[in-house]
Amino acid sequence: MSKELNADFWNHRWTTGQTGWDIGYASPALTQYMEQYKNKNAAILIPGCGNAHEAAFLVANGFTNITLLDISSTAVLILEEKFKDYPQIKIICEDFFQHRGAYDLIIEQTFFCAQILEKREAYVQKAASLLKPQGKLMGVLFATEFESEGPPFGGSREVYTYLFDPLFLIKIMEPCYNSIPPRMGNELFILLQKK
């Protein structure tokens, strides 16, 4: 991959309206899981959060400790305005790989697929390091390979199992039955617990 997917890259995508990953609302797969999540005070991280539609859903459902993380200062300015009246939400402009914290849950929605293949193992290690003991990583991953140069970058259950298994107990990694229509049949729902 010739281009570097740094803050400049993502700021350019935001300022030019190239935000095809944004479906305009919280993913049904994620909201359905979170509707069953009992601990409303859980420390939740949403890395590479974009417009953070999931955060709005979480606040509306009583969650009180949400951290939004994005490398794009353009995205963060939008988030700061959008969530200015929400003390339950902390917004940080930072590279995920530099972030420090301790979370009960990391919500994965189109961030892993934005990582070049060479950074995916580092993603897994970083996610595990950010989770408290028994912490969980929940979300959706693409279950297909893409012909065009990414992002997004695809993958398969076999590759994901190989990557995550050393540090996570794979509780669920199955075809996502409630994907949005354009992604139906091309996503895996994951629920992974830190070992």
Image (cartoon, rainbow, N blue to C red):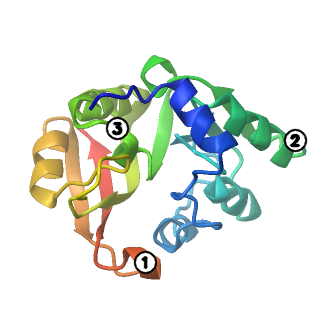
The x and y percentages for residue 44 are 56, 43
**Residue holding disc 3:** 115
Which is closer to the viewer, label 1 or label 2? Answer: 1
Q: In the image, what residue type sits under mark 2?
A: Lys
Q: Does residue 88 show up?
A: no
Earlier in the chain: of badge 2 and badge 3, it is 2
Q: Which mark is residue 2?
A: none
User: Badge 1 is on which residue?
Assistant: 182
Which residue: 52% across, 31% down? Answer: 9
**Which of marks 1 and 3 precedes in the sequence?**
3
Residue drawn at the location 36% of the way across and 79% of the way down: 184
Placement of 125 over or under 184, stated as above or below: above
Q: Badge 2 is on which residue?
A: 84
Mark with earlier residue (1, 2): 2
Position of residue 52 relative to residue 184, above or below, is above
How crowded pointer 1 is (Cα within 10 Å; few <14, some 14-19, many 20+) is rated as: few
Answer whether residue 123 is visible to the viewer in this image: yes
Dot 2 crowding, Cα within 10 Å, few <14, some 14–19, many 20+:
few
Mark 3: few/some/many CA within 10 Å (<14, 14-19, 20+): some
User: In the rendered structure, which amino acid carries the disc numbered 3?
Assistant: Gln
Whether tag 3 and tag 1 are in contact, CB under 8 A, the answer is no
Q: Residue furthest right?
A: 85
Q: Say what amino acid the circle numbered 1 marks.
A: Pro
Q: Secondary structure at mark 1?
A: helix
Res 128 quadrant in image: top left
Q: Residue at x 62, y 33 (%)?
A: 11
Q: CA distance from mark 3 to mark 1?
A: 21 Å
Q: Secondary structure at mark 2?
A: loop
Quick check: marks 2 and 3 in contact, CB under 8 Å? no
> Which quarter of the image is occupied by the N terminus?
top left
Say which of marks 2 and 3 sits in front. 3
